[in-house]
Amino acid sequence: VFAVTSTARAAADLPSLWAERLKCVVAVEYVTETEVARQPSSAMGTVIDSNGTIILQSGAIDPRAATWQLKEFRLFAAGSAEGTPAEYLGQDAFTGWHFLRAGPELRGKLVPVTQFAGGEARAPAMADFVWGIGLRGKEEDFAPYLMQSYVALIQSVPQRNAIAQHEVASPGLPV
């Protein structure tokens, strides 16, 4: 009964949670420029602070590219075809994560994911309902869509991890 009740409550709150959290995800486009080619790429990022700092997972940018080869960073809010310039801040040597800064025109429309950290933190448990945001490609204006699943396995390898039955978010976006 508890599982059904908490799942039903989560489902009832989902539309308002969804609307709030859409403001903390962006699509990122950039160009890697070499002597012989210009390679456009895209990734997904999460807003992490009120200064418009965006975090990208380590694999979002080719590790063989030099910083000076990375150009024309643009950010797209979820569901938007209009990109705005972004500044590449660099990569963290320990984690491999990359960081960008949104320009002032987009910064005011974004909300850091840390704003939603209120309440008592608890570790996920077996069979917990989890959900996240997916973003379609540029040809579909980075349309957001709901992804959801249930925790199917919890293990330590070496960190404690919860693994869901299905994908729960686009790579680099929060769950």
Image (cartoon, rainbow, N blue to C red):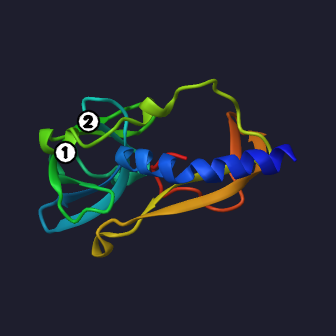
Classify mark 1: helix, strand or loop: helix
- Above or below, 111 relative to 44: above
Classify mark 2: helix, strand or loop: loop
> Is residue 71 visible to the viewer in this orientation of the structure?
no
Name the residue: 84% across, 43% down.
2
The image position of residue 153, as x and y in percent, is 78, 49
The image position of residue 119, as x and y in percent, is 59, 25
Name the residue: 42% across, 36% down.
113
The image position of residue 29, as x and y in percent, is 24, 58
As shown in the figure, which amino acid type bears the numbered disc 2?
Gly
Left or right, 133 with reference to 9: left
Residue 52's tag is 2
Whichever of callouts 2 and 1 sits on the residue coming sooner in the sequence is 2
Q: Crowding at label 1, few (<14), some or many (≥20) Cα neighbours within 10 Å?
A: some
As shown in the figure, which amino acid type bears the numbered disc 1?
Leu
Q: Nearer the viewer, residue 83 or 171?
A: 83
Residue where numbered disc 1 is placed: 106
Contact, CB < 8 Å: mark 2 with mark 1? yes
Name the residue: 77% across, 43% down.
154
> Is residue 67 visible to the viewer in this orientation of the structure?
yes
